[in-house]
Image (cartoon, helix red, strand yellow):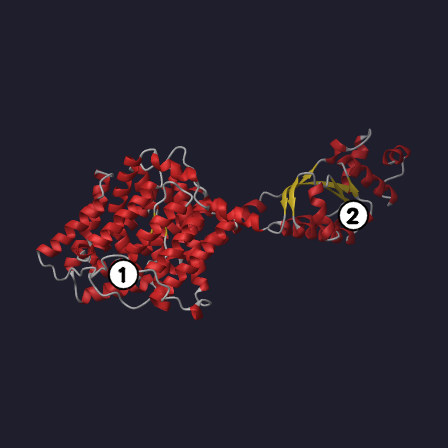
Amino acid sequence: MLSRSWGRVASLLPARADFAVMGRNPRRDLLAGLTVAIVALPLALGFGVSSGLGAEAGLATAVVAGALAALFGGSNLQVSGPTGAMTVVLVPIVAQYGPGGVLTVGLMAGVLLIMLALLKAGRCMRYIPAPVVEGFTFGIACVIGLQQVPNALGVAKPEGDKVLVVAWRAVEEFVRTPNWTAVALAAGVAAVMLLGARWRPTVPFSIVAVIAATLAAQLFHLDAAVPIGDLPSGLPAPSLGFLDLSALGSLLAPAVAVAALAALESLLSATVADGMTVGQQHDPDKELFGQGIANLAAPLFGGVPATAAIARTAVNVRTGAGSRLAALTHAAVLAVIVFAAAPLVSRIPLAALAGVLLATAIRMVEVGALRAMARATRSDAIVLVLTAVATLALDLVHAVIIGLVVAGALALRAVARQARMDQVDFRADLPGEHSEEEHALLAEHIVAYRIDGPLFFAGAHRFLLELSEVADVRVVILRMSRVSTMDATGALVLKDAVEKLNRRGIAVMTSGVRPGQRRALESVGALDLLRREGREYATTPEAIAGARAHLHRAGVLPAAPDTAEAVR
């Protein structure tokens, strides 16, 4: 047992092949890593500020989590660090538990992610419907944009943990004391990023815009452009001083939310990276393990919980990265910036970082994908809208749960509607030679139904209502060979229908019961009910012969020697 457990852990550790790839084209990977670092710097600073722990927390996360997730993760192309989606989850945690609570949550989330990896839960990502993913991505973009309103308007962040309320209070404060300098810087940075990305997609316009905004604030002495503030020149020594063991119980739910989001966003990002390349395939369980290690280590250095970043991963792929060396280079370059350029970074205006994140939020919205989902089916549109609204009104984890539940319910309804019960002409299966008069006489007393599709809890009661309305016959034959699936509810409904018809003097015969249905029928006693009366048959002709025999015994049909022989 111990060797088996160690084998599972060993399968998640980096293999020699993972490092061998790093030597194939190091120059290209180094260049890609440098480019990603330039793009990631303002994002790391902005997400650190937005989380409530400060710009230094964002940088520490990008360095520590970025390096460890690259080493231990399951993708050669993934770039990890602080993200907007994670920031959305962290803000209410900071408001309720403070910075120490966030760091503790990060540690707990790391443990949960490692447990998910050991349980091989990475492959569950494939079961998340596309409308849920698109809905919460759109909701995240809206929340990120709303979070930047106070800094973009140059006002102090109002009290509150609901992003809509905070944004509205910030607008009210701006109306009372306008700060057009902050608005101009935020709008200018966002405009340069959005327009520049269309003109030259490979140029990191985010860093260009931030540098220009910082220089403008310094040269023109724009006092209204509030800077980030002092940054430590280096990473803090690892410490567990923030850990409060007495609060672990109350922090479990936030940790589950953080771990769920980290798993979801990381696996989604890895899937996107695979789709952008040829020959790359990530290991979902190793990716969860790598994210778990990263989230265990980042809080020790004052970092926030991390996850893979779709935007930075996309930049990494587009600039030619082919191995983990690119993501490691990205982390190393950011570490150099932390140690060598902290005084310069500290002068960046908060409004400029707000502009970066506003542009990032706008670029997250894939209008074509949203339009496609909305037009696909009404169910997809409902799931998308509900997930997006829940993201804004509640939080990401609840939004995903709501999206999954609604998507599942709508899918069950669609499957249940596929079940049909059609009256069919049984004369084609009538054994023996018969006159038209006998055909007509049998048709007066026997009706045959063919059940197609699933017979389970979502649609079984509709079947009961249809079957209970049968009237003016003596025998009902149920042809069940085309029932695709049956659960206990479906079997119980069938039993109730048979009992109700029997009480009305109508005999029920079944034919073609498949082996997979017998267990459900036996569990509720439906099969015993049919066997007791001798009314279960292998084929439809046998069921019709049994129905004729029943009618003869009941005196409904006149006795005939050939009929008796046919029954035998």
- Residue 297 appears left or right of 114: left
x then y, percent, for residue 510 = 75, 42
Mark 2, secondary structure of its residue: helix
**Residue 494 sits above or below residue 161 on the image:** above
- Determine the residue positioned at 53% across, 46% down: 7
The quarter holding residue 503 reads bottom right
**Residue farthest along the right direction in this orientation:** 561
Earlier residue among tags 2 and 1:
1
- Residue 340 appears left or right of 378: left
Name the residue carrying label 1. 54
Q: Amino acid at mark 2?
A: Leu
The reply to whether residue 119 is visible in this rendering is yes
Question: Crowding near pointer 1: few (<14 within 10 Å), some, many (20+)?
Answer: many
Residue 530: mark: 2
Mark 1, secondary structure of its residue: loop
**Residue farthest along the top direction in this orientation:** 433
- Determine the residue positioned at 32% across, 61% down: 164
x then y, percent, for residue 47 = 29, 55
Nearer-the-camera pick, 502 or 376? 376
Residue 383: mark: none
The reply to whether residue 407 is visible in this rendering is no
Question: Crowding near pointer 2: few (<14 within 10 Å), some, many (20+)?
Answer: some
Nearer-the-camera pick, 240 or 498? 240
Nearer-the-camera pick, 269 or 136? 269
x then y, percent, for residue 174 = 20, 64
Nearer-the-camera pick, 125 or 325? 325
Q: CA distance from mark 2 to mark 1?
A: 72 Å
**Residue farthest along the bottom direction in this orientation:** 246
Q: Amino acid at mark 1?
A: Gly
